[in-house]
Image (cartoon, rainbow, N blue to C red):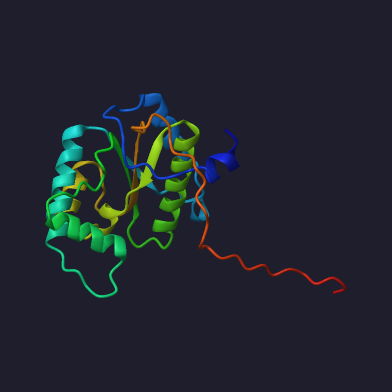
Amino acid sequence: MDALTAILTRRSTRLYLDVVPDRELIEKVIEAGRYAPSGSNSQTTHLMVITDRKVLDDLADAVQEEFAKMEITEGMYISLKASIKASRNGSYRFHYDAPVLIVTANKAGYGNAVADSVCALENMMIAANALDLGSCWINQLHWLDENEKIRTMMMQFGLLEDETITGGLILGYPKAGMPDRTMADRKGNPVTWITMKRGR
């Protein structure tokens, strides 16, 4: 699959087989993330790869518990509101029970922390599509970055004290067998062209 096709046909996957992909495939996805661009080539994005089912279950329980405590406020991001509501009824699994969760972190106070991590995440999602794996952006741990319970848990899994959680993704074999590659219409992301006029 060429790069442009991998980009244009990437879709989010939320239903997975309960099978951890071969280590070699996960490593290829990780390598794509590690080769993403970064500000001044800083290469400070930290990737934490979780495949332990107990750890994934414990994280899901903790995230549900902490979201359930949060107040919904006016102007709050719609996905965050949905996460809080789902947590309150006890049905929330932020990682959709995928077999792999890759969490990104970067240096706290670094101006490009989120941007660099997002470049790595996008590379990994495109690579996953090219390798016939499903993936989906997962941002809930970033929203809970300042939550003491979540930070304590993540520090047990490798998060450093001087790092901030910047995002994550889930990964695995799609339940349908192959990723959904139906190209979705683009209704947003407007484009403005500024071109040189002839005769200048």
Q: Is residue 21 above or below residue 61?
A: above
Q: Quadrant of residue 112?
A: bottom left
Residue 150 as seen in the image, left or right of residue 114: left
Q: Is residue 63 above or below residue 156?
A: below
Q: Nearer the viewer, residue 101 or 165?
A: 101
Dividing the image into 4 quarters, which one contains the N terminus?
A: top right
Residue 77 as seen in the image, left or right of residue 90: right
Q: Residue at x 22, y 41 (%)?
A: 157
Q: Residue at x 26, y 47 (%)?
A: 159
Residue 38 as seen in the image, left or right of residue 100: right
Picture coordinates of residue 59 (x, y %)?
18, 44
Residue 7 seen: yes
Picture coordinates of residue 193 (x, y %)?
67, 67
Q: How many marks?
A: 0
Picture coordinates of residue 135 (x, y %)?
38, 40
Dividing the image into 4 quarters, which one contains the C terminus?
A: bottom right
Picture coordinates of residue 189 (x, y %)?
52, 62
Q: Residue at x 26, y 52 (%)?
A: 141
Q: Residue at x 29, y 74 (%)?
A: 75
Q: Nearer the viewer, residue 152 or 200?
A: 200
Q: Quadrant of residue 96?
A: top left
